[in-house]
Amino acid sequence: MESAVSISQLVKTFVLKKREGIRWTSTDVKAVDGITLEIEKGQSVAFIGPNGAGKSTTIKMLTGILHPTSGTATVLGCLPWKERTKLARRIGVVFGQRSQLWYHLPPGDTFELLSKIYEIKKDVFKSRRDMLIERFQLSTFLDTPVRKLSLGQRMRAEVACSLLHGPEVIFLDEPTIGLDVIARQELRDLIREWNQENGVTVFLTSHDAGDIQHVAKRVVVINHGRVVLDDRVSRVRRQYLREKVLSVKYADMPEPFSLSGVKTLKESGHAFKFEVDTLVVPIEKVMTEIMRIGSVVDITIEDPPLEEVIAHIYSTPSAAVTDDEADDDIDNDESVS
Amino acid sequence: MNWLTSYLELARAYLRINFKSLLAYRGAFISQMVAMFVNDFVWIAFWCLFFTRFPVVKGWGVKDVITLWAIAASGFGVAHVVMGNALTLSGIIMRGELDSWLLYPRAVLPHLLLGRTSASSWGDALFGVVVYTIFVRPDLPHFCLFMALIFSVAVLFVGFSVFTGSLAFFIGNADSVSTQLRIAMITFSTYPSPIFQGFVKILLFTLLPAMFVSHLPVSALRNMSIVEALYSFGGSLAVLFVGVSTFYIGLRRYESGNLMEMRG
Amino acid sequence: MSKYFYIAITSIRSKLAYLGEIGSKTIFLFVVLYIFLCLWKVTYAETNQTSLGGLSLKQMLWYLVVTESIIMSLPPIATLVDQDVRTGSLAMQLVRPLSYPLNMLANTTGERVLSFSINFAVGSIIALIFVGPLDFQIQSIAMFLLLLPLSFALDFSIYFLIGLAAFWLEDTTGLTLIYSRMTMILGGMLIPLELFPDGWQQVLRILPFSAIVYAPARTFVTGDVPLFLSLLAQQFAAILVFSFAIRVVYAIALKRVFSHGG
């Protein structure tokens, strides 16, 4: 298989000047400390890590914004910082803080502009735009100024913008941040579809465990500028992402609760916090039981925070799972919500 | 030549979308334009009064100074109508917004400059042409030369704005320094050139190239001299070159990540 | 010991932002005064005069120092009043008609005096460098010090009126812009009234603009008693007229506020 992204011993050192009292001190900060990675065309990779782990720096080097201190990286056969404009035609980017959409105008106007920036032929542009409008369901708000759109609508339009010029690789930085549950799922589905049906390589960074599970097939965890884990999502899920945390509040004291695979983390008055091992018992069964034993006033279901997952990665010996079990899970992946 | 047409197409697309964006808030746009008109007109009024009392100063009459104002205002206006981000370049650099522009398959500087239009500059651009037509009443050859000189002065102002904005790559607090330099430049550009002599005159041909706005273009129009117009354009190109070079030198530093504190 | 040094440095650093503002004023004044020095030098030379409009070159530059200092010291009076009208905080004080304008006057005048002093100090240093000291007379300074606060009060009353227009207008910035520009031109900021075309001078002496800018500046550079007295009269008259206008507008505004339920 051809390589989409090929990174070898990539290092980026910054010189950070800090002011302490009245003196200036200069320290070398190794934001990226020797990353080696190979991503094939058509793969869907989640690149996760805590803040300051080196994710953004790596992406900036892959997209040609930053020059590395040492090491190499090629994206689609190009050296990003040397062939920036050539590569820019073939990659798409969605960065959380950066919006391509013109705020006071409808998304359609931004599409027009992008066709001129990327010099897309008129007929190609028209057909691709119409296809994106249909697949991303943008027609209802295509003529509405962006400032009047909901965040979910805006993000769909943003991702559509990044695909307009038909890139072979897309880099997404925290695309689902701030979205509500439904919008988040819609966006994840769209990205995953685009990867599977159009063969676009997806490189996603996120803080959200759900993003990882529903968009990517492979997850790379980095911390302190180094790759800490590089494995299939299914295997990582099985090992580290199997738990869900349920917070329930009842109207009055419920019947006693016991179900294998469910651990009571906390209880105070009528409020309970459960930890559910989804590989032992499906969430559906737990929910049914919870609703049966009492009258529920409030319920929240959360993934464990990523920082906990990463801490867990550090402390748990890996490969506690056989290959066969992992393969079974790949088939089950799509069906889990 | 292909790249030239490509970038002209890009400029047209940006001008269209920028204008459309301004129209979304028509009221504010019009009032900003009118405000600029009023501002500029105050100076025309001043000069009319001055030249009523002192009809000729160092060979300059009221028509000359109005011509000067027209070229300066429209030159500045056109520069920042088309390339509005030249005015906010230092802010763009300091806020790390350069990164967004680096993601496009276009040369960074021209692309980012096109990205915005300055609403008030539309007022300046129109003002110069209106005032020149009404007060000076030129014939067709003069008017054509006038338009060409506006283009030349616009190039100069873009170059100078890019230069001052690029200082953000090298010094902190570049925003206020850059603003001061621009104000000084515009101020010196709008006074009759012969009043400046000696050392200052040299300064105004070099570090603060106001003479390429106040001296050469006005002289070219008085004498209908293509040669002087070419000299003027040459000066503008030199300023543009300095500005663009400064930017790209600074960009190299930026891409090596030495401006960490600025990137948030 | 280093702790106190650090505190001192931090305190200086916080003043730096303030100094930066003074720095930019200095540069601006330097550029303007220098340019006008060049312009007037050339004009005096070409007309072969030592006195234009009753002023020597030296006096002309010092005249400019005062006018620029006055214009540049303007606080955002109209904006403040406009905001108070729109937020309704003015309406709450309408029952005691005197306190609001006087409060606003006190606040903004303090700001204005400080700003003027800084501008004037900077401008003076620059003028000293360019043309040397003026032949000061105690009486001209005294007259100047009398006219200046009246000039501020008059300017205030007009901007205050403009701010009150917020009761009826969507946006008062247009009015503010026009008035400020008229003050610059018709108030003699750049050229003293004497050099205006003859027909204009009569009219301009009646209009309030010259009472604000020209009056203090002219008195400062040439302490002319008859002129001073006529300017004083002009200022008083203008202040009376505009104070009366404020009272009238206030009454109308009050009616409007109460009819709309406050």
Image (cartoon, coloured by chain):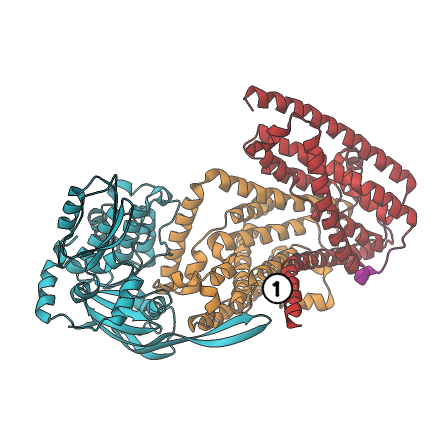
Chain colours: A cyan, B orange, C red
Residue A145, image x and y in percent? 35, 42
Q: Residue shown at 65%/62% (left/top)?
A: C11
Residue C41 seen in the current view: yes
Q: Is residue B67 magenta?
A: no
Residue A78 seen in the current view: no
B185 and C230: which is toward the camera: C230
Q: Is residue C129 magenta?
A: yes
For label 1, the crowd category at 10 Å Cα-Cα, with few meaning under 14, some 14 to 19 and many 20 or more, is many
| Quadrant of the rendered image containing residue A200 | bottom left
Residue C62, image x and y in percent? 81, 53
C157 and A187: which is toward the camera: A187
In the image: residue A235, left or right of residue A89: left
Residue at numbered disc 1: B209
In the image: residue A135, left or right of residue B200: left
| Quadrant of the rendered image containing residue A116 | bottom left
In the image: residue C201, left or right of residue B238: right
Chain letter of mark 1 equals B
- The residue range painted magenta reads C128-134
Residue A283, image x and y in percent? 16, 51
In the image: residue A123, left or right of residue A83: left
- Quarter of the rendering occupied by the N terminus of chain A: bottom left
